[in-house]
Amino acid sequence: MKNIVLIITLMLSSTLVTAQQTMTPELLWQVERLSVMGLSTDASTIFFTIKTPHIKTNGYNSKYYSMPFSGGDITEIQKEEVAINDKNMSPDGTYQLFHKEVAIEAIKGKAVYKDLEEADVYIFSDLDIRHWDTWQDGHYNHLFYKKVTESDDAGLDIMPNEPFHTPQRPFGGDEDYIWSPDSKAIYYVSKKLKGKAYATSTDTNIFKYNLENKTTENITEANKGYDTNPAFSSQGALAWLQMKTDGYESDKNDIIVLNNGIKQNLTANWDDSVRSFLWSNDGKAIYFTAPVDGTIQIFKVNYPDKKRIAPAVEQLSNGPFDITGIVAQKDNTLLVTRTDMNHAADIFSFDLKSKTFKQLTNINSDLYASVDLPTVEKRYVTTTDGKQMLVWVILPPNFDATKKYPTLLYAQGGPQSPLSQFYSYRWNFQLMASQGYIVVAPNRRGMQGHGVEWNEDISEDWGGQVMDDYLAAIDDLTKEPYVDNDRLGAIGASFGGYSVFYLAGIHNNRFKSFIAHDGVFDTRSMYGTTEELFFVNHDFGGPYWDKTNEAAQKTYNAFNPITKVSDWNTPILIIQGGKDYRVPIEQGLGAYQAAQLLGLKSKLLYFPEENHWVLKPQNALVWQREFFKWLEETL
């Protein structure tokens, strides 16, 4: 074991200067990224990894560390020394769970025609042809179990010949499966639908596989929306997250508990949506995270056991930060990770009695100490329909209210996602402000953390009230003497990119520059090429050919950015990923071609191997440099 007592900072590069400076793209890509692996069996030790971008190799370096639960000395260890509870081993120690990819269907030409080994073709006769950034090739994630004394080759597939995924694609992991407390059953998440049904539905279910008789039971069959994240309490009660509405990926997420045949919704009467949860050690309560008022906080709901009562939800934490995960509980302490707009994730403990935090790591402290940090302010703006809307305002380091600053309206993606105290390595407000820009980030319609109705108001209304919300936010800020009204820009990705394309046609010369990343430019072609049809069916109102559907026709006509192109008159940077199948390539290419033919100052930044995000370090640096180069040229 290699013992290194870290000055909590985990040895940042000696190339960092000690004089005060501002955050740059290059510095941002020196920020180390923490991820907690878990606790030791006796809960005395925390194990975590630090991932550091490595620009020259265009990848990441990972190191492993341990630390006492209460904090203190941090020790670098080898991967083999990580000794956490293995959730994939059966409680009786007999079996091991694991997943791997298996070939089920012949879709590639060389699989259909054995004599044509070089055939580079896919043959489809139904939908579900691609997902996120991968084409369907007939291989599926399947779940296996084996005795701990056997090799993986001896594992038994619990879904033999079934063309379904466990874990779920594209983002599912081993949180999609667990053992029953008695080691006699496996519970797992799967969406057992094919073709068009798969593409148009969110009906994932939790299945129970009996090891003794090899039978499978769907325990959530009655619910037609998402059922995910199963977890047993120490007392044997099963909890999971559930959305009721089929096809609505951003529906209210509730905590459901099943125990001795009694099913209860613990958050039914609470007006918001759960992100993640953890059973209390005694099984009498559940701690969970959820967005609230532009942050993500810790909440608690008691489990009433067999009493059919609706328990009250209690908010435990409060402050200008995001709780990005609840890792574990020990006695009266929760172990969590936390971020804010100026700081990447670190480990904190949270005292359940005093409701106070203690910071256990500060892995980027030297870097942050070397830079002047922006100021983050909370502001409330009255919308055109008389509502109070939270707006985050990020001011440049060493802000001087007697000066005038160029200002950026940030349009969040989703569209139903919280605009909270997140720390992004691409849409990084700290970096933007450090380049001398004020950032205006409104919690417009569609944001979680302001009640279910506020979140749902954006569906089938993409070009409606939400656009008024954006303009209300920027118009309110332009009243401030330090905002340069002649240098306003609007930026965003995904739905935020759609917002930029739409605002470009209706902004009445407010903005001098636009940046749209992987944005929806033409709602009709978006419907025809995106892979998760359930999303556009719900948010657009249905297909464009349904002339009887007023909501859908409004989406494809009045709310379609392509219909506003004749009014474009402002420079625009368009960014597009080649492997983005959520908002496919023709969206960015169509917008760029229109801008060019209109004679507008425009630029296309095309990443052929990136998906809806930009993940490779060198590509990410190009993204940042081009982003700020464009703003320098146009603002």
Image: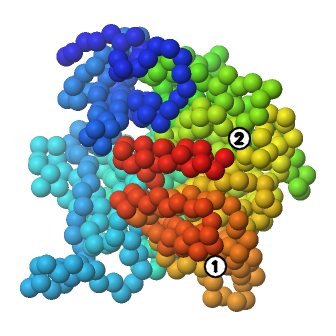
Decide: few, some or many residues near mark 1? Use Cα within 10 Å; few <14, some 14-19, many ≥20. Answer: many
The quarter of the image holding the N terminus is: top left
Q: Is mark 2 on a helix, strand or loop?
A: strand
Q: Is residue 440 left or right of residue 523?
A: right
Q: Which mark is residue 23?
A: none
Q: What element carries label 1?
A: loop
**Which residue carries the number 1 mark?**
542
Q: Please determine whether, in this image, residue 284 is positioned above or below residue 582.
A: above
Amino acid on which the number 2 mark rests in the picture: Pro
Mark 1–mark 2 Cα distance, whole angstroms, equals 40 Å
Residue at 63% x, 73% y: name it: 598
Residue at 21% x, 82% y: name it: 109
Quarter holding residue 275: top right
Amino acid on which the number 1 mark rests in the picture: Gly
Viewer-nearest residue: 374 or 21: 21
**Residue 405 in view:** yes
Q: Which mark is residue 406?
A: 2
Q: Please determine whether, in this image, residue 49 is positioned above or below residue 439.
A: above
Front: mark 1 or 2:
2
Quarter holding residue 397: top right
Q: Is residue 83 left or right of residue 450?
A: left
Q: Please determine whether, in this image, residue 369 is positioned above or below residue 289.
A: above
Q: Which of marks 1 and 2 is nearer the N terminus?
A: 2
Residue 376, given in percent of the width and then of the height, sits at 69, 30
Residue 223, given in percent of the width and then of the height, sits at 56, 65
Residue 165, given in percent of the width and then of the height, sits at 35, 64
Q: Is residue 47 left or right of residue 256?
A: left
Residue 422, given in percent of the width and then of the height, sits at 58, 38
